[in-house]
Amino acid sequence: AARNPGQPEFLQAVTEVVESLWPFIRQNPRYAEQGLLERLVEPERVLSFRVSWFDDQGRVHVNRGYRIQHSMAIGPYKGGLRFHPSVNLSVLKFLAFEQTFKNALTTLPMGGGKGGSDFDPKGRSPAEVMRFCQAFVTELFRHVGADTDVPAGDIGVGGREVGFMAGMHKKLANTAAGVFTGKGLAYGGSLIRPEATGYGTVYFAEEMLQTRGRSMEGLRVSVSGSGNVAQYAVEKAMQHGARVLTVSDSGGTVIDEEGFTPEKLALLMQIKNEEYGRVSDYAARAGVRFEPGMRPWRVPVDVALPCATQNELDEDDARTLIANGVQCVAEGANMPSTNEAAKVFEAAGVLYAPGKASNAGGVATSGLEMSQNAMRLSWSQEEVDARLLGIMRGIHAACVRHGRRSDGSVSYITGANVAGFVKVADAMLAQGVV
Ligand code: NDP
């Protein structure tokens, strides 16, 4: 804490990981050597830079850009870029730290990184967003590369923004190497990449439910958020026969007791992705209930899929969900549950999956995009989806293997942390103290 003042999210993520690794390291003392943990909690490189750009009225704006290159132990730095006013060093360091373990869990050769800016895309014209993206890449381009650091999207960075950044990167670097993932299909993107995080989260929830002989069919599901991850979590949960009752944004929650349909989801996607509107606009047009300022967790459900942002589900929310009978919580977002909420879920015997396990399908499919780019070919939708499903099942199996308690139950927190740690730690031990 003394070395990282004012970084609560980073300390929260490190505490969760180190607490759950401790018993494992005591049983396996070789992982206490070579300053492994001390090195793992220090990013290899932290870049911070000025991003200046003109708005449509010709006024100059200055934002701060970042790239955290956390670990290259098992492959090039890999992780998304977030554009949101809440972005700061603490948030990006927590995300880069988590990303390192998550990427290891996918079994693909990717290190961990994260970046972004405190730029707020809300209310900005497409021309302003393009100018900002181009200004951001004029500095970022010298730090990234297909074998060095491969950025992607995250909150506030979707296909449009990745396109603007990839275009500027090409111009500056004079290379067509697919340095970003999440690219459009016309210039090297992968089928199923937009869907992958949300689909993967539902695949993971199904694996967890199966350990208790259940499935999503007929279950009541709440989803938070309404962006990329949330939309495809809603779609896949519907395809699996679930009744999806909620979506949300920072303005409030949509509650639809009849459940989402493909038509309603298409309307939500049009409003969010093409009109850059709010879920309140969706509620008005779909004729469903909207609760301003409310989060979805008071709605009684069997399965909760938090897909918005960090710390959106606290201990009280967890207790409310449990009192209402929740069986399974799979995180599509990164660290949406506070550490206290996660502990409450585990203590109550809820099937609880931390984001680094259940949302790893996104980065895994980015890894598949990198493979396709390197081979200069593209796989079919069926092929990528089948690989995604296989990877999610593999992560689930690894969590069960490393997270089994003496009473036979599974801690997915311990399982994910130990499985991810072992791969990164073995790579670090083999490569010496660097
Ligand atoms: P989007 O920008 O597409 O959507 C973000 C959603 O979260 C919006 O509904 C947004 O609402 C809400 N949100 C963002 N910040 C806040 C906040 N401070 N308070 C309340 N609500 C907020 O992002 P994604 O769907 O890509 O990302 C969602 C989560 O999933 C993030 O935690 C991200 O790190 C994680 N993730 C994403 C992956 C991907 O492939 N995209 C991969 C793995 C994890 P509003 O518009 O009101 O801000």
Image (spheres, rainbow, N blue to C red):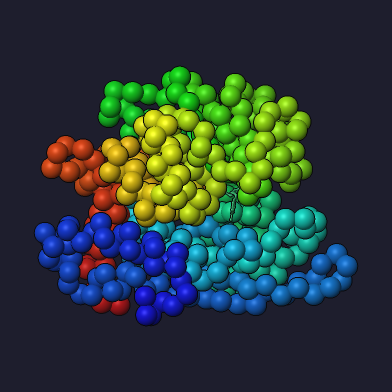
Residue depicted at x 17% and y 43%: 405
Q: Position of residue 308 (x, y in %)?
A: 55, 47
Q: Position of residue 96 (x, y in %)?
A: 44, 63
**Which residue lies at the image location 45% right of the left edge and 19% below the top edge?**
218
x and y, in percent, of residue 262 in the image: 63, 24
In percent of width and height, residue 158 lies at 63, 50
Answer with left or right where residue 211 lies relative to residue 387: left
The reply to whether residue 27 is in sight is yes
Residue reaching furthest to the bottom: 2
165 or 328, which lies in front? 328
Does 341 sit left or right of 271 as displayed?
Answer: left
Image quadrant assignment for residue 54: bottom right
In the rendered view, tell whether residue 322 sits above or below residue 125: above
In this rendering, is residue 206 above or below 171? above
Viewer-nearest residue: 41 or 172: 41
Q: Is residue 421 left or right of residue 370?
A: left
Assign the N terminus to one quadrant of the image: bottom left
Q: Using the rendered image of the protein, determine whether residue 229 is visible from the camera's viewpoint.
A: no
Q: Nearer the viewer, residue 433 or 373?
A: 433
Against 175, residue 162 (above or below) is above
Residue 100 location, quadrant: bottom left
Q: Residue at x 39, y 30 (%)?
A: 325
